């Protein structure tokens, strides 16, 4: 009896491009900041990765300075003064929530939400807060709200969402964030997540496909025929080569 061949065919997929790219950029900037800190040259980068504050704050927004406008957005790639633990906690939360949200809403929409959340929080901080924002806290807040909206759409209030929000606020308090900063980050996350109600191409495409089906099904007659033909083409009985394992193929099943 011939021995069966064991083939390990695994493809590496860049499944959530926006989420993965965001995390990679944050990690690379953190490593660069560490290297510059050892040489005593990290002050310039840390200042650039801190959002502007109110005029009475430590880093006021200057209307005629391009750097001030840039800092309204890129502060989300920085690391908080509390150290690496807060940064990696935020990145872990983003990696846990981001891929599922990106699969549901699409990469473009998630990218827009991240942009809106960070920009809105940065503008609020430049108007009302005397301390700079540093890090991806508004992005984490936005993804927590997005995850909760999935349950809200089913007319349910998830108790887990309330627990996560309490733990999220406690994390910000223990990391040294003030009350105004926490409110600004939550407001920015809420503003970014609300964008999901305005446009969501993937959800609209699914609704359009379901409405076009006949007899209440998800596929119309032509799509069903094409689907059956594709199953027949991909059936093992139509392949030209077989493994020498004395196995008889009688058909295929799809669950």
Image (cartoon, rainbow, N blue to C red):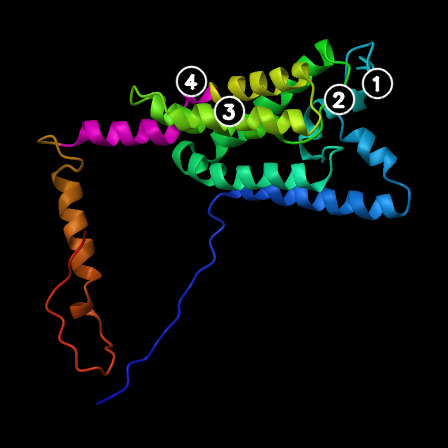
State the predominant SS element of the stretch in magenta. Answer: helix
List the residue tagged with mark 3. Answer: 165
Residue 228 locus on image (x, y percent): 14, 52
* Rendering quarter of residue 59: top right
Q: Are marks 4 and 3 in contact (CB under 8 Å)?
A: no
Question: Mark 1 and mark 3: span between their CA atoms?
Answer: 29 Å
Q: Is residue 85 magenta?
A: no
- Upstream in the sequence, badge 4 or badge 3? 3
Residue 58, numbered label: 1
Q: Is residue 210 magenta?
A: yes
Residue at the image position 80 percent from the left and 30 percent from the top: 48
Residue 84 locus on image (x, y percent): 70, 41
Neighbour class for label 2 at 10 Å: few (<14), some, many (≥20)?
many
Q: Are marks 4 and 2 in contact (CB under 8 Å)?
A: no
Vertical arrangement, residue 219 with respect to residue 72, above or below: below
- Upstream in the sequence, badge 1 or badge 2? 1
Q: Magenta segment range?
A: 195-213
Mark closer to the observer (1, 3): 3
Report helix, strand or loop for mark 4. helix
List the residue tagged with mark 4. Answer: 198
Q: Are marks 1 and 2 in contact (CB under 8 Å)?
A: yes
Mark closer to the observer (4, 2): 2
Question: Mark 1 and mark 4: span between their CA atoms?
Answer: 37 Å
Question: Mark 1 and mark 2: span between their CA atoms?
Answer: 8 Å
- Upstream in the sequence, badge 1 or badge 4? 1
Residue 236 vs residue 174: left or right?
Answer: left
List the residue tagged with mark 2. Answer: 132
Q: Nearer the viewer, residue 141 or 222?
A: 141
């Amino acid at each position: 009896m011939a021995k069966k061949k064991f083939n390990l065919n695994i493809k590496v997929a860049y499944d959530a491009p926006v989420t993965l790219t965001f995390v990679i950029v944050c990690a690379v900037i953190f490593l660069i900041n560490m290297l510059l800190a050892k040489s005593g040259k990290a002050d310039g980068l840390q200042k650039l990765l801190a959002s502007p504050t109110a005029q009475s704050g430590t880093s006021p927004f200057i209307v005629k300075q391009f750097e001030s406008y840039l800092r309204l957005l890129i502060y989300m790639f920085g690391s908080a003064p509390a150290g690496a633990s807060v940064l990696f906690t935020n990145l872990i939360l983003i990696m846990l929530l981001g891929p599922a949200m990106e699969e549901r809403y699409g990469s473009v929409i998630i990218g827009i939400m991240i942009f809106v959340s960070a920009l809105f929080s940065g503008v609020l901080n430049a108007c009302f807060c005397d301390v700079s924002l540093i890090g991806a806290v508004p992005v984490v807040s936005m993804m927590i709200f997005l995850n909760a909206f999935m349950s809200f759409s089913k007319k349910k209030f998830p108790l887990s969402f309330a627990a996560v929000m309490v733990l999220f606020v406690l994390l910000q308090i223990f990391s040294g964030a003030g009350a105004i900063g926490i409110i600004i980050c939550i407001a920015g996350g809420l503003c970014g997540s609300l964008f999901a109600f305005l446009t969501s191409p993937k959800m609209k495409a699914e609704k359009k496909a379901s409405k076009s089906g006949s007899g209440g099904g998800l596929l119309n007659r032509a799509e069903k025929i094409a689907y059956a033909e594709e199953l027949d083409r991909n059936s093992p009985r139509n392949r030209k080569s077989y493994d020498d394992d004395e196995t008889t193929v009688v058909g295929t099943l799809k669950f």
